[in-house]
Amino acid sequence: MKNFIDISDISLKDLKKILNVSTKRKIKRKNLNTTEPDKDLPLKGKLLVQIFEKSSLRTRLSFYISMKQLGGDVLTLRPDEIHLGKRNETLFDTAKTISTYSDIFLLRSKDHKKILDLKKHLQIPIINGLSPDSHPVQVISDIFTIEEVTKKKISNLNITWIGDSNNVLNSLIQASNKFLFDLNIACPKEYKPSNLILKLNRKSKIKIFHNPDDAIKNADVVYIDKFVSINDKVNKKNKLKKFKRFILNKDLISKAKKNTFILHCLPRGSEINNELFNSSQSKVWQQAENRMHVQKSVLLYCFDKLR
């Protein structure tokens, strides 16, 4: 039994195996319809229970389809219809109940500590479907997309992140610490990564820029995300004003390499213009589809069935 909570928890060997198995299984599904199961049915009879305390589209759909394709089943519960440590039931009792009735648990939480606390009490694997601290299932699938598009290992590439220091960036920094790829971060001074996340990932090859023109110069991949997250409790007008010069448009992307491509984990806002988002340089929909292929390998990893 293995958990998937943070990229930093997982060995480089296992991360690479997740990517390799994803490639093999994606090829094998070429002529199958969406809900047709994989021939080997590795998770037949297994039940995934998932709970989302925050809104979710891609993570919810991709894990649902992933589990179905692997031969398992899925039950999605609403946080307002169960206890999950609230009212008169402890987190321990909730965890024991979930462990009794299911085989694996996914939680998208407003509190990273809740995921860590549940891990202590669950007798089944837990997957972090996003927390304020990290988004590991997004980033491992993004690495898959990067290597699929470039046909190169990410350790030989230069990735530029444009945007806020959020949960996705935290996981990307952890990934840089594992795979040792160059990571340029472009953001206003007051929105740079925390000293703690940088200290915990000292091996990572990170450079921080406050001028996006400099950050993008040698980029093989430009990864942009919303400047203001859905649950960001800030003055949104002021924040967007500070990020104005970081908007990804044709002028900015022209300063990168000619074959540079763009990633965005969605949903999008005003941080990228429509023309560029819908251009051939954008690999956003390939990125979104690959969530499903890679998360199948994440599930297999948790069950110790990566083959």
Image (tube, rainbow, N blue to C red):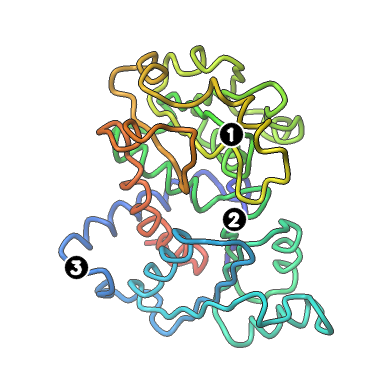
Give the residue furthest to the front: 237
Q: Residue at x 51, y 76 (%)?
A: 48
Relative image position of residue 130 (x, y in whole percent)? 59, 55
Q: Quadrant of the C terminus?
A: bottom left
Relative image position of residue 88 (x, y in whole percent)? 84, 84
**Secondary element at tag 3:** loop
Give the residue furthest to the left: 31
- Mark nearer the viewer, 3 or 1: 3
CA neighbours of label 3 inside 10 A, class few (<14), some (14 to 19), many (20+)? few
Numbered label attached to residue 177: 1
In the picture of the structure, the residue carrying the numbered disc 3 is 32
Pick whichever of labels 3 and 1 is earlier in the sequence: 3
Rendered view: 223 above or below 129:
above
**Secondary element at tag 1:** helix
Three-letter code for the amino acid on which mark 2 is drawn: Leu
Residue closer to the observer: 142 or 39? 142
Three-letter code for the amino acid on which mark 1 is drawn: Asn
Relative image position of residue 197 (x, y in whole percent)? 71, 36
Res. 53 image quadrant: bottom right
Three-letter code for the amino acid on which mark 3 is drawn: Leu
Q: Residue at x 68, y 27 (%)?
A: 192
In the picture of the structure, the residue carrying the numbered disc 2 is 130
Rendered view: 184 above or below 175:
above
